[in-house]
Image (cartoon, rainbow, N blue to C red):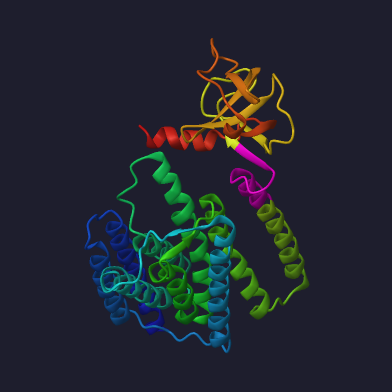
């Protein structure tokens, strides 16, 4: 008992030191950041393993869970690259596998992941609430360090991309990893993180899937994996708990369906899409912070005067009203105007410029994204 109490007492300052060290590493810029992070994390691992005794995690399902979590990660990557058949492929931002990329990226990231999971397993084995919370935060920080840190977030667009593609997925991933580490040890955590992190450095191509949809899938994957592993290997002992769990899963499913529909609208994957209004040009009918749902224009249904349309100009989408339609040499030309503007828009729009016709307005739903943009642009 004395030894156990002593280990827990040592584990707390170790957890705090590990977390603070990684938080400091997040803001370090430069080409040597990953190697500095790898060396610091390795030193933290050595210190943690020296001062805190790692208690063994006894589970007959370690190997099965490791295999299953690896298959889930590989299946996700397979579906991700198959999506390229629909959306096309682009050159991976990480680049092709070379000796340089192996030394400067793959090797230090692998060391960070291995060191992090050794520390996580050692700390979580102490079975103490505060240490578990600190270990979770430490795991999130490790994911962010592997992704390149936070020193390059200079505008709202980059920050929003960081939140969707890195930060929020790191939160859900570490819920899964904390659960796996507590019950099955470090092996399934290592398998999941190494596969989901290093593939981008090994494969020179990437799917051009919309980033909002990709972010949603990255957010959802750890939650579905957690649920699947829980169903396979965790037994419920009381019917009441089973009932609560069933209701919770139904609620979770409904929330996920809602979020999926929302993401599909934002990314315009089907007939309908959504766009947030950020200017006052349509004030009165459509205000700043409102979102409009539009039906994509397929050149079959005829656009009429007074329709509110979404058109694209200079890589920017605008929501304005059609005030006049001219036909010149068989080409329909649409004169548009914002309801709150004094004059018509300059020039005219053609069928090829029109993205869709507005069918529905949802008030206030776009304010969070606008507030974020304002904060980051100050």
Point out the residue furthest to the top here.
342
Residue in front for this viewpoint, 181 or 52? 181
Relative placement, left or right, of 43 versus 113 is: left
Q: Tell me where residue 14 appears, x and y as whole percent.
A: 32, 70
Query: Quick check: can you spot residue 360?
Result: no
- The quarter of the rendered structure image containing the C terminus is top left
Quarter of the image for residue 334 reads top right
Q: Tell me where residue 375 appears, x and y as whole percent.
A: 40, 35
Q: Tell me where residue 43 appears, x and y as whole percent.
A: 25, 74
Residue in front for this viewpoint, 157 or 349? 349
Residue in front for this viewpoint, 168 or 134? 168
Q: Residue at x 57, y 14 (%)?
A: 340
Q: Residue at x 68, y 49 (%)?
A: 258
Point out the residue furthest to the front here.
329
- 68 above or below 337? below
- 11 above or below 344? below
* Range drawn in magenta: 258-274
Relative placement, left or right, of 112 versus 171 is: left
Is 268 covered by the magenta stretch? yes
- The quarter of the rendered structure image containing the N terminus is bottom left
Is 361 covered by the magenta stretch? no
Query: Quick check: can you spot residue 30?
Result: yes
Q: Residue at x 37, y 84 (%)?
A: 3
Relative placement, left or right, of 271 versus 371 is: right
Q: Tell me where residue 26 appears, x and y as whole percent.
A: 31, 57
Count every numbered label the image shows and give the total: 0
């Amino acid at each position: 008992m004395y030894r156990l109490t002593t280990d827990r007492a040592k584990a707390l300052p170790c957890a705090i030191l590990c977390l603070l060290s990684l938080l400091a590493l997040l803001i370090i810029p430069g080409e040597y950041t990953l190697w500095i992070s790898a060396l610091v994390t390795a030193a933290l691992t050595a210190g943690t393993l020296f001062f805190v005794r790692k208690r063994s995690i006894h589970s007959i399902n370690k190997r099965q869970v490791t295999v299953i979590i690896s298959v889930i990660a590989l299946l996700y990557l397979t579906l991700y690259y198959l999506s390229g058949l629909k959306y096309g492929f682009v050159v991976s931002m990480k680049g092709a596998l070379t000796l340089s990329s192996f030394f400067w990226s793959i090797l230090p990231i692998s060391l960070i992941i291995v060191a992090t999971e050794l520390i996580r397993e050692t700390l979580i084995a102490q079975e103490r609430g505060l240490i578990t919370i600190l270990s979770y935060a430490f795991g999130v920080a490790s994911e962010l360090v592997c992704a390149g840190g936070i020193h390059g977030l200079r505008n709202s667009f980059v920050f929003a991309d960081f939140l969707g593609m890195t930060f929020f997925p790191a939160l859900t991933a570490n819920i899964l990893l904390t659960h796996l580490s507590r019950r099955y040890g470090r092996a399934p955590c290592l398998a999941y993180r190494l596969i989901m992190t290093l593939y981008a450095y090994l494969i020179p191509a990437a799917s051009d899937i919309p980033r909002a949809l990709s972010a949603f899938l990255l957010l959802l994957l750890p939650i579905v994996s957690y649920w699947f592993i829980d169903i396979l290997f965790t037994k419920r002992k009381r019917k009441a708990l089973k009932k609560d769990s069933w209701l919770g899963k139904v609620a979770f499913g409904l929330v996920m369906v809602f979020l999926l529909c929302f993401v599909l609208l934002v990314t315009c994957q089907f007939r309908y899409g959504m766009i947030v209004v950020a200017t006052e040009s349509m004030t009165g009918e459509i205000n700043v912070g409102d979102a409009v749902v539009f039906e994509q224009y397929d050149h079959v249904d005829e656009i009429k005067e007074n329709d509110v349309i979404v058109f694209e100009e200079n890589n920017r989408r605008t929501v304005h009203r059609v005030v006049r339609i001219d036909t010149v040499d068989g080409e329909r030309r649409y004169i548009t105007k914002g309801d709150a503007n004094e004059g018509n828009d300059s020039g005219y729009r053609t069928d090829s410029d029109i993205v869709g016709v507005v069918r529905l307005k949802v008030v206030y739903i776009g304010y969070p994204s606008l507030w974020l943009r304002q904060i980051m642009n100050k």
